[in-house]
Image (cartoon, rainbow, N blue to C red):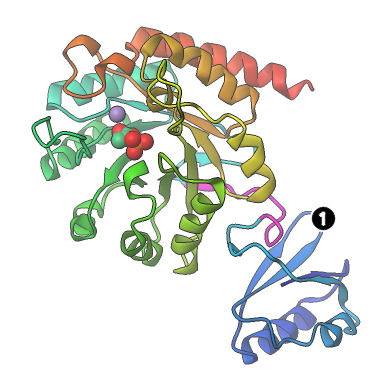
Amino acid sequence: MIIVLKNGVDKTQIDNLVNWVKSQGLSAHLSEGQFRTVLGLIGDVSNVDIDLIKGLSIVETVTRVSEPYKNANRKFHPDDSIIEIGDVKIGGGNFAFIAGPCSVESEEQICSIAGEVKAAGANLLRGGAFKPRTSPYDFQGLRGDGIELLLEAKELTGLPIVTEIMDLSHLPLFDDVDVIQVGARNMQNMELLKALGKTRKPVLLKRGLSNTLKELLMSAEYIMAGGNGRVILCERGIRTFETATRNTLDISAVPALRELTHLPIIVDPSHAAGISRFVKTLSYTAAAAGADGVMIEVHNDPQKALCDGAQSLTPEEFAVTVRGVNRIREAAKEN
Ligand code: PEP
Ligand code: MN
């Protein structure tokens, strides 16, 4: 249920209403936007007397929210959420480039790529330490050592780091990680999502291969229901009947999610395409669609990459992509 308050209502009146909501066993989510103040009620609202609330002098409108995701719902929070990671902001007009190799392979590899993507305009460094590979015989990642190497690259470049968690039991290893990624395969690992909800770390939540946007938002809701509102959504391509690309980039997800939620939305063109020469075009498409960022795999020697070399850009190609994306963002602003 959302209660839109009248303009100019004073704080004591809002506090009284919030306290009353809580006394009904519900939780209250207050969003003081630029143009209006909205109070979202979360919990079982079936017994709440809507007419009683409508009759209050400070209330403009009351509506029941039918969507099962409440915290993630734009109706509860009309303004875009901005997630801050150190000096980097994502959302609400702030665009981020997240770049780096699919997986951390060595100190030399991650540190040199980190320097190069930073010089090209990256705001955050990505790199998998725990890798969800389809085959158990493929490189599984450097695990805890990989996180240590990412932290070294961070120290060197100042870039905050993004890396994937695959199992709840590894959470203590992520203490110094800036953004925890939940990969497509774990989007519905509810226990993991609940545990991340108890942290206050930004979570980059990737859409599952066969999941709807509603399911993605419900997964975000799991994290947010625990009190962690710092969720960034990522469209990374879905499974379709098409085989020309690794997955199919669902670009409509960007405008569709934009309406449904206030959370930042980024696009991963690398896993969507699976083919490096398509990554630039898909990045441009993401920028034109109004995404809040792109996450791009970059490797200094793609042909020798231990994972996802075929979809990895060289640092030079990444630099060209950054420049093009920025030009498209400028052009999009003019509309
Ligand atoms: C990744 O980002 O390296 C990754 C494994 O992505 P996804 O979960 O989208 O497949
Ligand atoms: Mn990858």
Please provide percent x and percent y for residue 146.
16, 37
Residue located at (51% from left, 20% from top): 283
**Residue at the farthest left position:** 137
Identify which residue, 84 or 138, lies in the foreground: 138
Please provide percent x and percent y for residue 40.
68, 70
Name which quarter of the figure residue 140 lies in.
top left
Residue located at (43% from left, 33% from top): 239
Compared to 23, does 138 lie above or below? Answer: above
The magenta-colored residue range is 74-84
Please provide percent x and percent y for residue 226.
44, 69
Q: Main secondary structure of the magenta part?
A: loop
Q: Is residue 118 left or right of residue 82?
A: left
Residue 104 at least partly seen: yes
The residue type indicated by label 1 comes to Phe
Count of numbered tags = 1
Please provide percent x and percent y for residue 173.
19, 53
Q: Residue under circle 1? A: 35
Name which quarter of the figure residue 163 lies in.
top left
Compared to 277, does 171 lie above or below? Answer: below
Where does the N terminus fall, quadrant-wise?
bottom right
Where does the C terminus fall, quadrant-wise?
top right
Disc 1 is placed on an element classified as: loop
Q: Residues within 10 Å of mark 1 (few under 14, many from 20)?
A: few
**Residue at the farthest bottom position:** 23
Instruction: Indicate yes or no: mark 1 CB to ligand 1 under 8 Å.
Output: no
Residue 183 at least partly seen: no
Query: Residue 109 magenta-drawn?
Result: no
Figure quadrant, ligand 2: top left
Query: Residue 82 magenta-drawn?
Result: yes
Residue located at (75% from left, 78% from top): 14
Compared to 15, does 74 lie above or below? Answer: above
